[in-house]
Amino acid sequence: MSLESFLAYARSKVTYFIAFNILNGAVMDCAWAQENPGSTTSNSKAQVKQIEQIEINGSTKKYDPRRDDTATKFVVTKEEIEKYGDTNVIDILNRQPGITNGNLNGIRGYTQYLLDGQSPPRNFRLEDIQLSQVERIEIIRSAVAEFSTQGIGGTINIVLKRQIKAANRKLQLALTHQDESGFSKRMNLSIANKFDDMSYDIYAFTTKTRFGRLNLTEIEKDDSKEDLHLFQTLRRQTATDNWIYSLNPSFNWKLTDEDSLSLKSRITELTSNSGTQGKRQSYDLPTNSLQQEDELSTWKPSVQYLETSWIKQLGEKTKLTNTVSVYRASINSESQMAISNVQRQSRQSISKILERHKNVLWNGNFSHDFSSTQTFKSGWNLESRDSTSLESQESLLKSHTKIRTQNMAFFAQDEWNESDIWSHYLGLRWEAFRSKLDNEQGQQLNKIATILSPIVQTRWKNPSNKENQFRLALARTFKSPEAIQMITTTLPHFNNDLTSPDTIGNPNLRPEIAWGLDSAFEHFGENGFNYSISHYLKQVKHLLRDRLFQSNELWLQQTINDGNALAQSLVFDTSFPISIVFNNAPNMNIKANMSRNWSTVNNVSGPNNRFAEQAKFNANLNLDYKFNDAWKMGANYGVVSGGPLRVAQDRINLVQVRRTTSAYAHWAINKESTLRMSASNLLLEPVRTQSSIFNQQEKTTVRSESRGVLFTNVNLEIKF
């Protein structure tokens, strides 16, 4: 299929889909009006938003999406985000039920991360998100049709601030210290105002970070055929300085009673300089050698983003939303490496990479409320992503790669309450992906894949005790291979070894397909005692995994489809005030969660052949204590199990038990000023890894350790 035919096909589908939805909305409006001739505007407006429902059980309850939505969703609030003074989204996620290292259900690499419901651009990193911009985090364990179903493990939607509720001005100053480095500094400034028909929010921040790390690595190789034993140690001291500044203005206009328009933009510049000094000691019988390995690198991304959104009311109960966004980024990076030994023999390498990225996205949805208990929504998503990369080494070797990906998706979903105790959700999403790649070596790829994902969810409340409810969800999800996994896009590594293999593409990759069944029992007590027990079961076919092997004395890595997996988990979490256990207890709340995971990969011999490096067990215990209106404090302890992990037939990793400890104190100095203090890794837990690759004659083992460091943070917030 040519590009022109693909775009023509997309345009025809979009035109038909939008026309059908608008006509369908008009027909439903007329039908509703005929069935309800006596309805008033005020009554119908009160029925428009099902999400704003409150349920009366003897007392008025605040809306809670985890309790009240049919589709399973857990929301991390703004208060939880700010509590520990975290600088990284992953640290916040790891305290939530069933999440390990930022991955839902502990399945590494299978969690879909979204920004405001949309896939982030290529080279997106969670670490780059400024938490002061985040309004809430939605954790979706199954799937919903309005979001891409490319999340076998689940979906995490990071919602950035959009609504401006009142005029405010806020300044935040923060200092972070790592005990191997100096201080990192951050300043955020937010100015917002609201008028009758217009509002704006101008957010700016600058961050200067400095951190260092000492890493010790041991490499051991045994070759029974050659009767060879090689042992090496590598000591690497790394220091990194980052400087980021960003401007994020947004504007909202109410054009008429039926129309509103919003405009949001972002300009971000980052400069990262890193230096590494390394010493490699080789103990090769019968001689030993010492080698100096130094590296200097610079990374400079520049990002521009513009988004406009138009919302149109099509009658009392019907709404059309359109959003168009453009993303542009350029990334310049340079790396210099020098290797020398005691015989004064030396090698040097200078590599440069210039990347250009451009994304254009159009998405929209049409929603209609049949009644106060039923909402229908359908929509579309069209996206084009273009990337070019020029990599050079010593001005001799060059690699020029062009990647174009085009995505098209349509969805429809219906959510309704059959009664006050039973609600249902039905969704269907169709997605198509086209990848077109070529490079300077003449490799070309033009591939199209389509996926259809049905979703069914239901929630039932116990009629005799509405504090208890049950959930069940069935969904088809997938994971599509990255375009760069299908074609060789990088030059050979200057210092090729087991830890830095060269990558080669595989044009025959297929998407992984999964069916998932999620179930849960939940209790939401009037006295604040809440708990839930949930279970998931996932069957995954056509697994994508990295094959690591040697060819012509070079280490190579290639992604392949290989085998199927079965994974399941039990997750328990609870929260309650300690006053329900002890009379006259202090104002303290307890949160706890734990997960037990099981998984197997069918073509990898056991034991410990777990799927996607899934940990067997993880748990968190969190205490929050409110001393008075001015002072709050708390602490969290987390643990993730370790042990041997067989990731392939010829590879075994040894994973350490990881313990995380953190504490915070919150002081409301007055109505305008707040001081937050926090510390993490209080146990100074080191980071250890071990990986072994072997065959009948050879075995290579790599062990690595970094000393545990203490992180402290002080954050002052001033409203003016």
Image: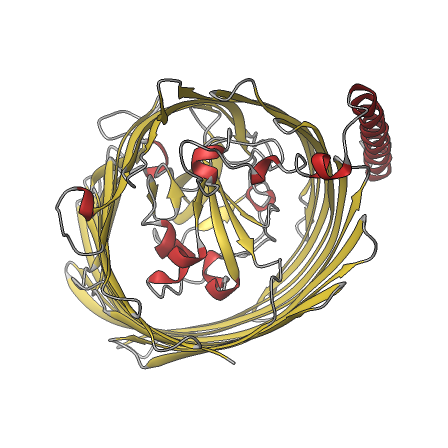
Q: Is residue 264 left or right of residue 530?
A: right
Q: Of residues 421 and 430, which is closer to you in this image?
A: 421
Q: Residue at x 60, y 47 (%)?
A: 119
Relative image position of residue 489 (x, y in whole percent): 59, 51
In this orientation, which residue lies closer to the viewer: 604 or 444?
604
Q: In the rendered view, does 231 fall on the left or right side of 550?
A: left
Is residue 153 visible in the rendered image? The answer is no
Q: Position of residue 254 (x, y in %)?
A: 78, 58
Q: Residue 479: give x, y in percent of width and height.
A: 53, 34
Q: Quadrant of residue 247?
A: bottom right
**Which residue is pictured at 85% across the width and 25% down the height?**
30
> Taking 591 as reference, is 29 left or right?
right
| Residue at image coords 46%, 43% | 62
Which residue is depicted at the point 46% across and 36% down? 154
- On screen, residue 617 above or below 587: above
Q: What is the count of numbered marks? A: 0
Q: Position of residue 390 (x, y in %)?
A: 64, 62
**Residue 283 versus residue 463 in the image, above or below:** below
Question: In the rendered view, does 521 fall on the left or right side of 480?
Answer: left
In the picture, residue 139 is in which quadrant? top left
| Residue 271 visible (yes or no) | yes
Name above or below for residue 98 compared with residue 605. Answer: below
Quick one: quadrant of the N terminus?
top right
